[in-house]
């Protein structure tokens, strides 16, 4: 039975009942492979068949690893899995190791996807990273990295990032490349006698200490009262400007993002 025939056979209700059912049928067909079998569960947003930005389930470590994430389906042809998002300060990012390991927050607002999940994703394919920044004056810029990967927990979730393309933000991550992750209770940075996460109230792949602090304290624009503790990207706004929004998102390199309906 084709889609039109199956619609005709449905009992007649009002339009509000019918449209969601049609949408569901189209979604089911779009999720099928050419032989009529369901496609494998999406590992990331590039494999999600919907073409609208929003929250969707992905399976970074196989069918038993379902989690909800925000998918950006609009920026540069879409398919981006948002791994970190700061928008309004509603979620506390000053957290211990185990929280950053598994993830926290809500994909509908602010969240961190989890270091384990970033490792699962980037260990199976080559990924690129896009960092999108917005200030309180209404300007938005980005930084793009053609290679992005995170090691497993035994490596300290070591960061590998490179192949920078400037979208107006400047390159803040060059200073963090090959660094291990540091939290308030796990000091893996290169700063002698101090913990960068405690010093700058965040968590990140700190060096000695940072030129990017996406998980810092949410503040409002230029504020020099507490040095470098805000949500900052030093090459663009300096250490004392806390950004309005800070989004990190990844997708497989040279992936075709199309729904084969």
Image (tube, rainbow, N blue to C red):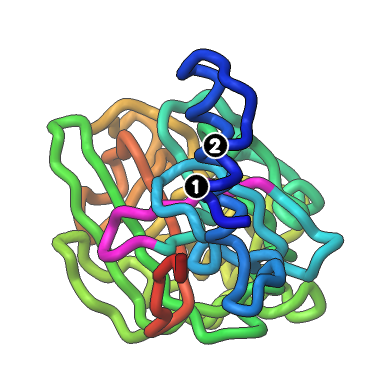
Q: Residue furthest right?
A: 64
Q: Contact (CB < 8 A) between labels 1 and 2?
A: yes
Q: Is residue 85 above or below residue 97?
A: above
Count of numbered marks: 2
Query: Which of the numbered marks, if any, corresponds to residue 8?
Result: 2
Give how far across and how far down residue 118 sits, in percent: 64, 67
Give how far across and how far down residue 68 sits, in percent: 65, 46
Q: Callout 2: 10 Å neighbours few (<14), some, many (20+)?
A: few
Q: Is residue 171 magenta?
A: no
Name which quarter of the figure residue 153 lies in: bottom right
Give how far across and how far down residue 207 sits, in percent: 51, 70
Name the residue at 55% across, 39% down: 7
Estimate the spatial distance between the alpha carbons at disc 1 and disc 2, rounded to whole Å.
6 Å
Q: What SS does tag 1 mark?
A: helix
Q: Is residue 46 above or below residue 69?
A: below
Q: What SS does tag 2 mark?
A: helix
Image side of residue 9 versus residue 154, left or right: left
Near-viewer residue (14 or 79): 14
Name the residue at 35% across, 61% down: 78
Quarter of the picture holding the N terminus: bottom right
> Label 1: which residue?
4
Name which quarter of the figure residue 195 lies in: bottom right
Q: Callout 1: 10 Å neighbours few (<14), some, many (20+)?
A: few
Q: Is residue 72 magenta?
A: yes
Name the residue at 49% across, 67% down: 46
Q: Which residues are magenta?
A: 68-78
């Amino acid at each position: 039975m084709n889609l039109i025939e199956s619609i005709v056979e449905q009992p007649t209700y009002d339009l509000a009942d019918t449209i969601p059912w049609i949408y569901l049928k189209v979604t089911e067909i779009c999720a099928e492979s050419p032989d009529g079998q369901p496609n494998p569960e999406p590992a990331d947003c590039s494999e999600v068949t919907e073409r609208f930005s929003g929250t969707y389930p992905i399976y970074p470590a196989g069918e038993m690893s379902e989690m909800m994430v925000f998918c950006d389906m609009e920026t540069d042809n879409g398919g981006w899995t948002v791994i970190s998002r700061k928008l309004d300060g509603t979620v506390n990012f000053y957290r211990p190791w185990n929280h950053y390991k598994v993830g926290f927050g809500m994909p509908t607002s602010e969240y961190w996807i989890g270091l384990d999940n970033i490792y699962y994703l980037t260990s199976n394919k080559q990924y690129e990273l896009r960092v999108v920044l917005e200030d309180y004056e209404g300007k938005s810029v980005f930084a793009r990295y053609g290679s992005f990967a995170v090691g497993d927990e035994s490596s300290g979730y070591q960061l590998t990032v490179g192949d920078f393309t400037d979208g107006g933000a400047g390159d803040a991550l060059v200073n963090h490349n090959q660094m291990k992750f540091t939290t308030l209770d796990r000091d893996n940075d290169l700063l002698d006698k101090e913990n960068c996460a405690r010093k700058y109230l965040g968590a990140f792949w700190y060096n000695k200490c940072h030129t990017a602090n996406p998980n810092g304290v949410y503040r409002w624009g230029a504020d020099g009262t507490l040095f470098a503790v805000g949500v900052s990207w030093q090459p663009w706004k300096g250490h004392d400007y806390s950004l309005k929004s800070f989004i990190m998102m990844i997708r497989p390199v040279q992936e075709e993002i199309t729904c084969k309906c």
